Image (cartoon, rainbow, N blue to C red):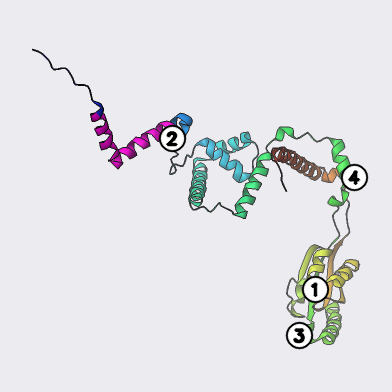
Amino acid sequence: MKTKAKRPITLRKKNKLINIITREPLFVFLILGFLGFIFIRAINPDSLKSEQPFLVNVSEKNLISFIQAQNKVYKEKSAKAYFKALSEDEKEEIKKRYIHQEVLYREGLKLGLDENDEMIKRRLVQKMEYLTRGFSQDIEAINETEIKKYYQDNIYLYIQEQTVSFSHIYFSKNKRGLKNALFDAQNTKLKVREEALYPEQAGKYGDHFLYFRSYINKSEKFVASQLGDDFSKDIFSENKIGLWVGPFKSTYGYHLVYIIKNTAEITPPIEDVASLILADLQQLKVKDVERRAINKIIEKYEIVE
């Protein structure tokens, strides 16, 4: 039985087939799409991987990074140890907080909330500064000589300023008038001295004061901020303890004052503040590492004016 030989496709039939294809837009679209797929796959194989925008990966690694950022723990090893020590409930709480942040962050990006936002810029700068502090291996150990020198050069930072503790009876110039406030204060001083009243017993005298009736271990600057410079100077120069003195004039009127304690300025010996000095020096060294790391980054950029 003879079989018929296949006829070759003639040029006319090829042209007819091409005309049919080009008249079908869907077919053309599919072909172009396929060619585009091949092209993208060739130049960037990873670009076609699904980004899975609705997937939040709560892996241990991500949670540890989250802890580092939240708790300002520079070393990953420390953050990992912290995470391992958490109970299951605490880890679950960390997961919830991470999911909360990640989801809202992504939604914010979708809405374009990150564009031209000065607050986000500052936050990113802070994060980069934080990351540069992680180079703890660049921080040199602090020796005793450094501590002594820093103490000598910056002793003013560790001076414990003079403080005073006192109670007062207030006579308002607005309520009584300035002259009457002074007169009433002078008369009341005679009464409270005669009665030998303690501060806690003197509430029946005077007017209600805007701030406090008693001030404990306050600096001259603090007292001045509430009662005025002249009043503060008078109180800090007063040497009569445990006695009603005054009247002293303030911004608001006159006051009888009972000095409970007046502590002189103290310059502590280096032994008493060595731990504070060490902490301050470490912070300075961290800042120095941060500065040098940022300068290296800046060097990569061309600055134009």
Instruction: Determine which residue is flagged by label 1.
Output: 168
Q: Kindly report which numbered mark, 1 or 4, lies closer to the viewer in this rendering.
A: 4
Q: Which residue is mark 4?
A: 152
Q: Nearer the viewer, mark 3 or mark 1?
A: 3
Residue 43, position as x, y percentages in the image: 48, 30
- Res 243 seen here: no
Mark 2, residues whose alpha carbon is within 10 Å: few (<14), some, or many (≥20)? Answer: few
Q: CA distance from mark 1 to mark 4?
A: 40 Å
Dot 4 alpha-carbon crowd within 10 angstroms: few under 14, some 14 to 19, many 20 or more: few
Amino acid type, label 4: Gln
The quadrant in which the N terminus is found is top left
Mark 2 to mark 1 CA distance (whole Å): 77 Å
Say above or below: 230 vs 75.
below
Nearer-N-terminus badge (4/2): 2
Nearest-to-viewer mark from 2 and 1: 2
Q: Is residue 175 left or right of residue 103?
A: right
Question: Mark 2 or 1 closer to N-term?
Answer: 2
State the extent of the magenta-drawn residues as a range: 12-40
Front-most of 28 and 282? 28
